[in-house]
Amino acid sequence: MTKFYVCTAIPYVNDKPHIGHAVLHLYADVLARYHRQLGDDVLFSAGTDEHGGKIAESAEKAGKKPQELVDEFSASFKQGLEKLGISNDRFIRTTDNGHEDRAAIIWKNLEKDIYKNTYSGMYCVGCEEFKTSAYVKDTNGECPLHKRVYEKIEEENYFFRLSKYNDQIKKAIESDEFTIMPVSRKSEILGLLKQGLEDISISRSAEKISWGIPVPGDATQVMYVWFEALMNYITVLGYPEHADFKQYWPADVQVIGKDILRFHAAIWPGMLLALGIPLPKTLYVHGFVSSNGQKMSKTLGNVVDPLEVVDKYGLDAFRYFFLRHGPSSEDVDFTWEKFESAYNSELANELGNAVQRVAVMVKTYQDGVIGNTPESKHDEGAYNQAMADFRFDKALEVVWEQIHGLNQFIDEEKPWVIAKSDDKDHLREVLATCVSNLLEIAELLIPFLPDTAAKIQAVFKDGIVRPFEGTLFPRLLVSHTDKH
RNA sequence: GGCGGCGUAGCUCAGUUGGUUAGAGCGCAGGACUCAUAAGCCUGAGGUCACAAGUUCAAUUCUUGUCGCCGCUACCA
């Protein structure tokens, strides 16, 4: 049995989950479901990143202990995943004992490439990152992402000899031994590697940032949160000794957002090389979700809550929109107008209505009896290729072509005309063909719209049409007005 | 400043290893039908393929330049 290990970046939990997190997990979920359907031994891991100064700060503001704060936020992330139908097998928290213990082991195993040095620089607590002097100057001394002034920090830190692995990483990426998708991201990181990676600071003074995993053997330092968070992809498998690690590593796909490419395509592979374990096979990098072409932000007031969409239109409609209209471009643009248009024309009119018209005809003309369904097998090459390329939009396009084909078939055959003749056999044959088409479509939809696929199967499965309550994707009558 | 990408029908995009009529979806218009969630099906609409120059028998597709947009990165000779 082929194994398939997919893991998502673990969100930093100093705020509630947003639509970007939803999309991240959605893509990984589709891969997981697709590979389960193929019969692979799938492990899908997600989780939350919970240490660092920013969380300590948020906790203080909220008058809570860091642990309380991350317990709350982590729980809301976990709950969010459930509501989005994310089928992750594991949920790791970087405050789990298992992760903390194993992070210490990893640190020890990396020690040949760790050294102490004095670091001095401008630091943004928001980014948890030191900034170059040029960048500081460019941004007028204030982080544009977090709207906060940089702090000058000078301290002794541990450093990781990342520069040592520059060429190995580059080679692995160039040769696609470590594949980065889409290709534009591959060239982006190769550009960076061409300039050469510098060693990175991987610890912080425990005095300043106490909310972190202690550096083994040095109580004055805690691990830099990013350095330690990256380890989750193997600590969740029980690195180094657990059977799961041997079974599932290397990851077949790691799914991340474009903002953290550098950590996953440079630092993380450097760590793995230093540990002497294989690199992930593929890194899939997705874009952001914009709204009307603009970045979603609280100040603009255009933030869309994924759960609001799910509550209003249903889970599968949410999944559909981002899978069909997402991965084709750098960023997916969400507007209620676009969403509703896709919902009505593609889900309600084309798919939902096709299911309805077939079900009703079988019921009306044949008392619900379908009879023997012929084998329906379209060429799924394009679909599978699209899945291999992470082009979920293209895969769905293939499915929708098939839906269109079914609607065409119905219009050409005109079962309602046949029904008026005496040719019962022909009618039965035509309708059975429609049903087998729908069952095949349902099969293809399983990774994308699991509930819808199950509903379609439930209606047509056993040779008779089972009544189903309600409507698959009821048409929306009222149009939502987008606020600007 | 460096590296990379983009600019194609009203909108979102695909495509051309250079060559008679440049494609899809949405939107729009028209048509035939009625099983269905007033859904579905069919047809059509004709865009200087950013601009300029160059290479070529021939460029939207190659080269260079200009303008505009975006991503990464940096201040180095």
Image: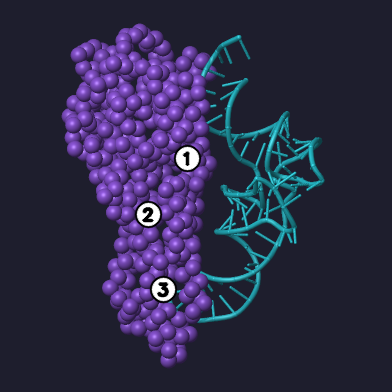
Chain colours: A purple, B cyan
Tag 1: amino acid: Pro
Q: Chain of mark 2?
A: A
Q: Which residue is mark 2?
A: A448
Is there CB contact under 8 Å for labels 3 and 1?
A: no
Mark 3 neighbour density, 10 Å: few (under 14) some (14–19) many (20 or more): many
Asked whether residue A309 appears in the rendered view, the answer is yes
Residue A203's spot in the image, x, y percent?
A: 30, 17
Residue A45's spot in the image, x, y percent?
A: 28, 40
**Which of the two labelled residues, at mark 3 and mark 2, occupies the earlier sequence position?**
3
Residue A73's spot in the image, x, y percent?
A: 27, 35
Above or below, A144 against B28 in this view is above
Asked whether residue A147 appears in the rendered view, the answer is no
Q: Hey, which quadrant is residue B61 in on the image?
A: top right
Q: CA distance from mark 3 to mark 2?
A: 21 Å
Q: What element does badge 1 sit on?
A: loop
Q: Judge left or right: residue B54 versus residue A23.
A: right
Q: Residue at x 44, y 32 (%)?
A: A173
Q: Are both tags, 2 and 1, on one chain?
A: yes
Q: Judge left or right: residue A181 versus residue A466.
A: right
Tag 3: amino acid: Cys
Q: Are both tags, 3 and 2, on one chain?
A: yes
Mark 1 neighbour density, 10 Å: few (under 14) some (14–19) many (20 or more): some
Q: What element does badge 3 sit on?
A: helix
Q: Chain of mark 3?
A: A
Q: Residue at x 28, y 13 (%)?
A: A205
Q: Which residue is mark 3?
A: A434
Q: CA distance from mark 3 to mark 1?
A: 37 Å
Q: In the depicted view, which residue is nearer to us: A181 or A90? A: A181
Above or below, A28 against A245 in this view is below
Q: Which mark is residue A182?
A: 1
**Which of the two labelled residues, at mark 3 and mark 1, occupies the earlier sequence position?**
1
